Amino acid sequence: METSTKFCHRCGHPVPKMARFCSFCSAGQSLDAATLPPTDVPYNETAHPELLDSGLLYFRDSFKLNKRLGRADFWWSKLYVLTIHSLSGIVFALLFGLNEKLELESGDSYVGWVLIILVIYLAFFLIAGLTAEARRLHDIGLSGTHLVLHLIPLVGTLVLLFFCIQPSKQFGNRYVA
């Protein structure tokens, strides 16, 4: 029994078998397209996500919102950032402790400079983190405007966490390049 529909290779919606274009996403269709529904495959920009590659991807795309970030790359990069925060926290704690000892001897304080560096550091990581979450939301087919959920204490963050653990969505995703 032959079916009269096939599935779009880009969005996965059913289209008539002889259609040349998908009526949902306007992608061109070949006449010998598959009649079985396509399956989603995990999307990751790096071939084999791991700590260093995903972490570098996180920083390389810090100011890009028009991309996607796969689930494995996202979580590996979060581990990378956690490691950086832990190490820098130790450094800042040592600098503040050293400042107390030096201030007693000379009367000068460099804590103002350390605070300026800390504010710049935190601003950069805040922007990088929010854009990474927006790219992760794009990967599952949601808009980055869902980040306003962070403004709802606890519940919003838990909802975004739930979104971030979802698998990639290739078909029907308007953010697929």
Image (cartoon, helix red, strand yellow):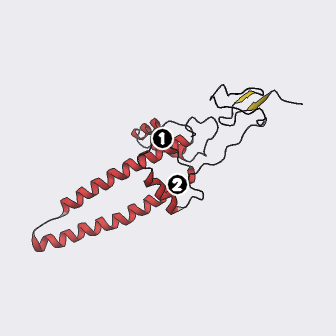
Amino acid identity at mark 1? Asn
Query: Residue at label 1?
Result: 66
Write the residue at 29% across / 65% down. Answer: 92
Write the residue at 60% across / 45% down. Answer: 168
From this view, report whether residue 22 is shown above or below residue 139. above
Query: Residue at label 2?
Result: 75
Residue in the foreground of this view, choosing between 7 and 117: 7
In the drawing, what numbered circle is on residue 104? none
Secondary element at image label 2: helix
Residue at the left extreme of this rendering: 107
Q: Position of residue 85 (x, y in %)?
A: 38, 61
Write the residue at 43% across / 63% down. Answer: 83
Q: Quadrant location of the N terminus?
A: top right
61 lies left or right of 117: right
- The first of marks 2 and 1 along the sequence is 1
Residue in the foreground of this view, choosing between 172 and 17: 17
Specify the quadrant of the image occupied by residue 3.
Answer: top right
Q: Position of residue 48 (x, y in %)?
A: 60, 59
From this view, report whether residue 6 is shown above or below residue 89. above
Amino acid identity at mark 2? Trp
Q: Residues within 10 Å of mark 1 (few under 14, many from 20)?
A: some
